[in-house]
Amino acid sequence: MRLTSEEVDHIALLSRLDLSPAERERAATELSQILDHFEQLKQLDTADVPPTEHVLPVVNVLRADESRPGLPREGVLQNAPEHAGGMFQVPRVVEAE
C-alpha cells in the first residue's frame, strides 16, 4: 500500500514535522512498508489465540503487606544535622507574615 504525497503531508502536519522533499519521499516509503507489514499480519488466523495483556504470566510481584517493627527513633535521628524533641529540625520554608 503506497501512501500518496497528500497522505504523507497530512501525517507530517499532524505530527508537526516540517519535512523536506527528500524526507517526505523517505517517510512515504517507510510508512508504506509498515502498512504492508500490517496487511500481512491481517492474513494470519488468530481465532484460537486468546487475548493477552502480557507476554508472560504475571503474578503479584509486590511483597506481602505485613506490619514490621520500625527503626528506633534514636538511630534515625543520630544522622540528622539538627533534631529536637525527637523530631527532625529543618529550615523554615514559609515566611511568617
Image (cartoon, rainbow, N blue to C red):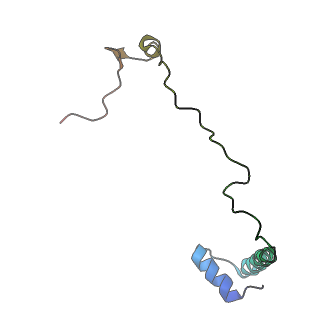
In the rendered image, the vertical position of residue 59 relative to residue 68, given as above or below: below
In-image side of 54 versus 1 (left or right): left
| x and y, in percent, of residue 24 in the image | 72, 80
- Give the percent coordinates (x, y) of residue 52: 69, 59
Looking at the picture, does residue 25 appear above or below residue 82? below
Q: In which quarter of the image is the N terminus?
A: bottom right
Q: Name the residue nearer the viewer: 74 or 20.
A: 74
Outermost residue to the left: 97
Q: Which residue is drawn at 59% across and 79% down?
A: 13
Q: In this view, does 57 lie to the left or right of 33?
A: left
Q: With 39 as the anchor, is 59 left or right in this view?
A: left
Image quadrant for the C terminus? top left
Dividing the picture into quadrants, the one containing residue 95 is top left
In this rendering, is residue 58 above or below 48? above
Residue 88 x/y as whole percent: 37, 21
The residue shown at (50%, 21%) is 68
Q: Residue at x 77, y 85 (%)?
A: 2
Q: Residue furthest front?
A: 48
- On screen, residue 33 above or below 70: below
Q: Residue at x 62, y 41 (%)?
A: 60
Q: Is residue 75 left or right of residue 12?
A: left
> How many numbered callouts?
0
- In depth, the one of 16 and 56 nearer the eye is 56
